[in-house]
Amino acid sequence: MDSRKVVCFIIFFFFPQFLITVSSSTEFCFTSACSRGEAIVQFPFRLENCHPKRCGYPGFDLFCNSQNQTIVELPNSGKFTIQAIEYETQNLWINDPEYCLPKRLLKLNLSGSPFTGVFYQDFTLFNCTFDYRGLDPIACLSGENYTVFATSHKRAISFLASECNLIATIGVPVQWTFLEPVLSSDLSGDLRLQWAAPLCRRCESRGRRCGFKSNSSTEIECSNVNRHGLPRRVRYALIVGAGVPAILCIVGLLCYIRGRVKRFGRERHTTVEFTSVAMPHSTITSGLDSTIIESYPKTVLGESRRLAKLDDSICSICLSGYMPKETLRSIPECQHCFHAECIDEWLRIKDSCPICRNSPNSS
Ligand SMILES: *[C@@H]1O[C@H](CO)[C@@H](O)[C@H](O)[C@H]1NC(C)=O
Ligand SMILES: *[C@@H]1O[C@H](CO)[C@@H](O)[C@H](O)[C@H]1NC(C)=O
Ligand SMILES: *[C@@H]1O[C@H](CO)[C@@H](O)[C@H](O)[C@H]1NC(C)=O
Ligand SMILES: *[C@@H]1O[C@H](CO)[C@@H](O)[C@H](O)[C@H]1NC(C)=O
Ligand SMILES: *[C@@H]1O[C@H](CO)[C@@H](O)[C@H](O)[C@H]1NC(C)=O
């Protein structure tokens, strides 16, 4: 599939009104993603096929592959999938698109990229002709007659050194510092990296948006954006481009209905039927009772969004990314998560999950 279509579909799907503005102000750097649940892409990152060049900092170009994964190409190490980006801490988590991270770690060289590890831990890899119980083998490097292990444990290293072939000792940019040496690991967990420049941490944590000061300068500025990440100019464009025609349409429709109703009333002379036309059955609501809504589980997000086991990094109702300390609520029947304030509002009006349309009420 053409990757350009993949990327831009999201924007138009989420923001149909963008069709009006994007064509008229292409210099606008909007927030994007390869698909739902993928990392949100914004400055200093940019999606190659969707954002103009000046929307991203040099070395921060990303693209979407045919499986809608977000990909970064590191200068000396090749392509990695981006699992998550945390703009407030300037951290990102990467993995191997071919699902054999240890193989990539043997050749990982971050020099030449803007990224470095946050925590490093040394692991020694051994190629053994025996399968040792109690040690986690690296399946994707092992063969029929040999097994590969990685360990950071001193005694395991000295034991395996006498029994097996040493492959290498590598510094792995792990997610957490381990307090004790790791006896064995299949090294498949995401790698945690950070970037030092451009420094947008403070800007992001204040809910503002970092970007280049102007078209030609490489200076960074921190500007105000609203909750949905739209700059003021675009918001005005939206109001003028979509709001005014919408109001005109509604006024026109009201005039038309009024005309019809009047004519109808004159023809029939019955007030009973007049009210039934003027008030169609739109007052029927199918929302849930607030006691039912309140009974759904709520969680407060920790400092690291990753602890919450979210399969989506944005709320599908308001389309904003989840921030630490925000309260989320999930629908027990389908486990879909949203901002509590968004889903409460939704469920008061409709009794179905906004994502899967399953009705929690049906059981
Ligand atoms: C990628 O995303 C598009 C649009 O969101 C979707 O139609 C397509 O099925 C996705 N492809 C894969 C492989 O998930
Ligand atoms: C990483 O790549 C740089 C540039 O190609 C090279 O100078 C450096 O020696 C490499 N480091 C390792 C550990 O291979
Ligand atoms: C491990 O050793 C076997 C031979 O015993 C060799 O074929 C294989 O390539 C080695 N694997 C690695 C990852 O070094
Ligand atoms: C593994 O060992 C067995 C028995 O020694 C041998 O028959 C087989 O060909 C070996 N497999 C590989 C892939 O070397
Ligand atoms: C920004 O710069 C590019 C080339 O550097 C130019 O093509 C483009 O017209 C400029 N845009 C604005 C709004 O000045």
Image (cartoon, helix red, strand yellow):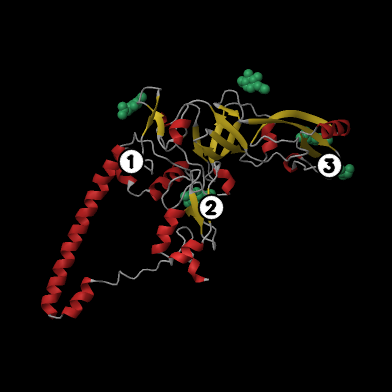
* Inter-mark Cα distance, 3 to 2: 48 Å
Residue plotted at (18% across, 59% down) = 252
Task: Name the residue type under label 2.
Answer: Thr
Label 3 CB less than 8 angstroms from ligand 4:
yes
Q: Residue 239 carries which label?
A: none
Left or right of residue 282, residue 148 in this image: right
Q: Name the residue under label 3.
A: 145
Could you tell me which secondary element the residue under label 1 belongs to? helix
Crowding at dot 3, Cα within 10 Å, few <14 / some 14-19 / many 20+, comes out as: few
Cα distance in 3D space between marks 1 and 3: 58 Å
* Secondary structure of the residue carrying numbered label 3: loop
Q: Mark 1 vs mark 3: which is more N-terminal?
A: 1
Left/right placement of residue 229 relative to residue 261 reads right
Name the residue type under label 1.
Val
Q: In the rendering, at what x and y percent does residue 237 appear? A: 27, 42
Q: Which mark is residue 22?
A: 1
User: Residue beneath label 2, please?
Assistant: 299
| Residue 329 x, y percent position in the rendering | 50, 55
Q: Is 309 positioned to the left or the right of 177 in the image? A: left
